[in-house]
Amino acid sequence: MSGKYSIDMSKAGFLGRGSFCTCHKGMVVETGELVAIKVYKSSQPDFCKVTALMKHERCVSVLQKLQEPFEQPADTKLWNSQMDALKPARLFMRLLDHSKDMNGEPGYDTDDGKLYVVTELAQQSLQDYLSKRRLAYAPPSKETVRSFTKAIIMVMAGLHAKGFVHLDMKPENLMIFDGRLKLIDVDGCVEIGTSISLDDESISFSPCYCSPEWASFVVQNGEEDYEISAAPDLDVWSVGCTICELVTLEAIMRKNCNKLTSKHGSKGKLKFMTWLGGLKCSPVPAAVQEFDAELLQLMTKCLLVCPQSERLTCAEALDSPYLAGHELQRRKSSPLMIQAYEEEEEEPEAEPGANM
């Protein structure tokens, strides 16, 4: 990108890898500012390169739209008065720059022919935090779980109010930027109401976090030309799974998925999706019930509700007793230091004549 950035290709600079890209720490050469740089893989078959370009263009487009000021959506279920003062930069990872083609549009860099997306740099993902807690056998406190729950639901309510569905919500796609929780990995986002086909290579999902109706869609897709409409309800289920993981410290569906995969080999995941698609009762683990009765109610009445039509939106869930009736408290052990609706505290100015 004309020498504007340097990429740290060392082990310490590696941030993550996906099917189509890798992410590394980088630096703005002129200022020394640290950034994250997503590099789409170039050594791929031509059909993968087409998909990579599609994901790159979508990523740039969605990130740009997410930073535009909020407007209340026509669907009143996707808005809550608690969102009135929200600023997009507090919910969504900020796009700083991206590779451009010769016309100045998102595309292959004119210098080296690669695809880049440059964003602000996070400190850790929610998955990183949970992994550390699991290794230390130290689940978060009730206060920390409640604070994270509020932040997660607020982020997703904001995404849905913007008119998008994520389709792959899970702990690794939520990251902490200077004490705030924000959404990342939006190159698979689609607009609400979009007809989705699994033939679309740019769509990603994770079986252990997907909803029963998405699981049914995946199973039926193998039998006929079948599509599903992108709806916020799909993400709401994934949000519920993610929040439960704050208590269990592992994906609540993974044990069953692994069991079926071990037993049935390559057919195991399809059997898991068939089981999930037929689920009739909320799969909230007993550990959640023992941990907090109000959190259990949030799961069974709002988020992890099997009939899609009875599932609440994230905006509606903000009014649940678990979130509406308590002041959020913070523990020093929590990396989440500030909610999206809160202003950052400014450093007090020194008094005139004070010793510096």
Image (tube, rainbow, N blue to C red):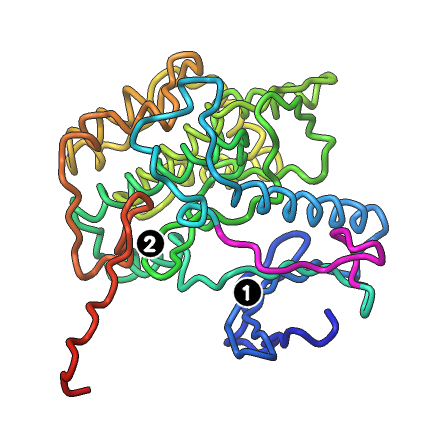
Q: Answer whether labels 1 and 2 touch (C-beta < 8 Å).
A: no
Q: Nearer the viewer, residue 190 or 338?
A: 338
Judge from the rendering whether residue 355 lies leftward or rightward of residue 304; answer left or right: left
Whole-percent x and y of residue 213? 52, 20
Q: Nearer the viewer, residue 61 or 31?
A: 31
Furthest-front residue in this view? 352
Task: Name the residue type under label 2.
Answer: Leu
Q: What is the spatial separation of the Cα atoms under label 1 and label 2, in whole angstroms?
A: 22 Å
- On screen, 35 above or below 92? below
Whole-percent x and y of residue 172? 45, 50
Q: Which mark is residue 130?
A: 2
Mark nearest the camera among 1 and 2 is 1
Whole-percent x and y of residue 219? 61, 23
Judge from the rendering whether residue 318 lies leftward or rightward of residue 232; answer left or right: left
Which contiguous range is marked in magenta? Answer: 93-109
Q: What residue is rendered at 64% in x and 58% in y?
A: 117
Name the residue beneath numbered marker 1.
36
Quarter residue 334 falls in: bottom left
Q: What residue is rendered at 56% in x and 37% in y?
A: 205
Query: Which quarter of the image is occupied by the C terminus?
Result: bottom left
Dot 1: element: strand
- On screen, 323 above or below 8? above
Mark 1, other Cα within 10 Å: few <14 / some 14–19 / many ≥20: many
Task: Name the residue type under label 1.
Answer: Ala
